[in-house]
Image (cartoon, grey):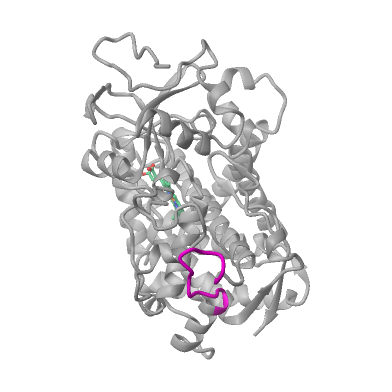
């Protein structure tokens, strides 16, 4: 049952299922739900094991303590970015997400610093999100009483937050060009989370010759890039040098400063890719979380009977009660309310844990030869951090398989965080937008629930929470929502 390991005698890859030539372990892993199959394999092979995705080996890390040990305690060694053929072809290793070494370090440090200067992580961005939440409520009020899928509204609201930071602009909910653009982002997230996307990442040269939706990844990407390039051009023409109003201005200033340096990492292609990273990374994951979260709330309008031990919670009514008591109905929820809304905070953490929107995070590679848990792993080994395994870890959560806010509440009903909660991953590659995303999820969800009662034409037991597709991401299924003003 065990793989033979690398031919290099120094490198004994951890055990794993026996691979077939060329196909590797694809037959054992099956065509869908790679994350669930990997979790199943970890029951046989332990928390560190090898799988072959096609001819390429990858070492899977499973379970909260394994992930923490690798990504936090051996952070440097595990901080490289592994390849993904689709993204590598699009980005040519130029942005933050798919670069490595000095280029990655320079772009990441610059971007974190610029976003901080522009107010991310501070009160000013929280206020910007509040404004957008108010705009979202206004738009949703126009549809209340009719059944609709809220995804495109949520996506527009979320995209507006990142666009206001990156481009200094927000877009109307009925702007047809912006809708098209957001559909391209979503189409790519869906394809990358489908079997086509996964197969492309394993057999790119072969799939290049096979017709299928995976070809749209690249045409969509080119259209998005054209939009971003057009926006950058506008900024080049209209900006005041040294007085940056948004991320693009900051980057252009930096390009000016580094003009004479032939080794500089600040040039047009890295600007386009970094902007694309923030736009794509900042939109799809966050809007999927909010969209999925509302569906979960529809599924469990009353969870009293659902759990053993019984939960005292009835949500979303219970969230609304908490919001009414702490915030009232005369002002919008703000970030400072979060500490006073323990139940709401627990539900939001539970939504992120339960859906694990990027169940396998993004691939890493080892930046140096590394000893890890009794294995000697060579520099360049691909690492798959199975984030969902931490979220389903029975040693960490009271009720890992079900949606249960008690996973984040102590016996007295106070919010209780958990070290195994890692939707944004951990360590040096931790999601660069984690703080922003957490603010958005909290402010958008609480503002919607403060204002509306959630209804649906389906009975809760008819609602299926299975993702529409799963691969890179767990994509929320489409559904019909009916909002009633409270
Ligand atoms: C619910 C929302 C989000 C989730 C669950 C999420 C999750 C993740 C995960 C798992 C990674 C991979 C970390 C690793 O390599 O180990 C990542 C990377 C990244 N995320 Fe997010 N993300 C979210 C929102 C955002 C937002 C709002 C932004 C933009 C402001 C963003 C920008 C990025 C970037 C640039 C990276 C690459 C970091 C690097 O390679 O150094 N993400 N995210």
Q: Residue at x 48, y 69 (%)?
A: 310
Using the rendered image of the protein, determine whether residue 412 is visible from the camera's viewpoint. yes
Is residue 313 magenta-colored? yes
Percent coordinates x, y for residue 265 in the rendering: 34, 38
Q: Where, quadrant-wise, is the C terminus in this rendering?
A: bottom right
Percent coordinates x, y for residue 198 in the rendering: 57, 31
- Where residue 175 sits, quadrant-wise, is bottom right
Q: Residue at x 54, y 80 (%)?
A: 320
- Where residue 204 sits, quadrant-wise, is top right
Disc tally is 0
Query: Which one is in front, 356 or 261?
Result: 356
Using the rendered image of the protein, determine whether residue 245 is visible from the camera's viewpoint. no
Residues rendered magenta in the picture: 304-317
Query: Which one is in front, 473 or 125?
Result: 473
Percent coordinates x, y for residue 413 in the rendering: 38, 75
Left or right placement of residue 53 versus residue 470 in this view: left
Percent coordinates x, y for residue 190 in the rendering: 63, 43
């Amino acid at each position: 049952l065990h793989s033979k390991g690398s031919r290099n005698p120094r490198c004994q890859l951890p055990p794993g299922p026996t691979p077939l030539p060329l196909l590797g372990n694809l037959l054992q892993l099956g065509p869908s739900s790679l994350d669930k199959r990997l979790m199943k394999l970890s029951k046989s092979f332990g928390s560190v094991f090898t799988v072959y995705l096609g001819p390429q080996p990858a070492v899977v890390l499973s379970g909260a303590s394994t992930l923490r040990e690798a990504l936090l305690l051996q952070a440097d060694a595990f901080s490289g970015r592994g390849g993904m053929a689709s993204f590598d072809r699009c980005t040519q290793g130029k942005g933050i997400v798919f670069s490595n070494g000095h280029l990655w370090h320079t772009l990441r440090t610059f971007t974190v610093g610029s976003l901080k200067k522009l107010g991310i992580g501070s009160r000013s961005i929280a206020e910007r999100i509040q404004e957008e939440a108010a705009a979202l409520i206004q738009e949703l009020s126009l549809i209340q009483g009719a059944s609709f899928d809220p995804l495109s509204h949520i996506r527009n609201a979320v995209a507006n937050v990142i666009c206001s930071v990156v481009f200094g602009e927000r877009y109307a909910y009925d702007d047809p060009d912006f809708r098209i653009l957001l559909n391209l982002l979503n189409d790519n997230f869906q394809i990358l989370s489908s079997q086509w996307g996964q197969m492309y990442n394993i057999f790119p040269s072969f799939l290049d010759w096979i017709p299928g939706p995976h070809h749209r990844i690249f045409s969509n990407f080119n259209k998005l890039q054209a939009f971003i390039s057009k926006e950058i051009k506008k900024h080049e023409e209209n900006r005041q040098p040294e007085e940056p109003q948004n991320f693009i201005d900051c980057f252009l200033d930096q390009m000016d400063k580094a003009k004479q340096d032939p080794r500089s990492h600040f040039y047009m292609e890295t600007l386009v890719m970094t902007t694309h990273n923030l736009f794509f990374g900042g939109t799809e994951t966050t809007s999927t979380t909010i969209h999925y979260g509302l569906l979960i709330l529809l599924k469990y309008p009353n969870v009293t009977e659902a759990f053993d031990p019984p939960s005292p919670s009835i949500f979303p009514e219970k969230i609304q009660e908490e919001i009414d008591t702490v915030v009232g109905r005369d002002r919008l929820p703000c970030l400072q309310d979060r500490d006073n809304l323990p139940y709401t905070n627990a539900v939001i953490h539970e939504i992120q844990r339960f859906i694990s929107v990027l169940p396998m995070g993004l691939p890493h590679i080892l930046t140096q030869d590394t000893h890890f848990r009794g294995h000697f792993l060579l520099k360049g080994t691909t690492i798959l951090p199975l984030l969902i395994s931490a979220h389903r870890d029975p040693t960490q959560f009271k009720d890992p398989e079900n949606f249960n806010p008690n996973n984040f509440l102590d016996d007295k009903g106070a919010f209780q965080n958990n070290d195994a909660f890692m939707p944004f991953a951990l360590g040096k590659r931790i999601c660069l937008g984690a703080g922003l995303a957490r603010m958005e999820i909290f402010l958008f969800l609480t503002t919607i629930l403060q204002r509306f009662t959630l209804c649906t034409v389906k009975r809760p037991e008819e609602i299926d929470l299975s993702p529409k597709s799963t691969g890179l991401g767990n994509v929320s299924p489409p559904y019909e929502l009916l909002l009633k003003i409270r």
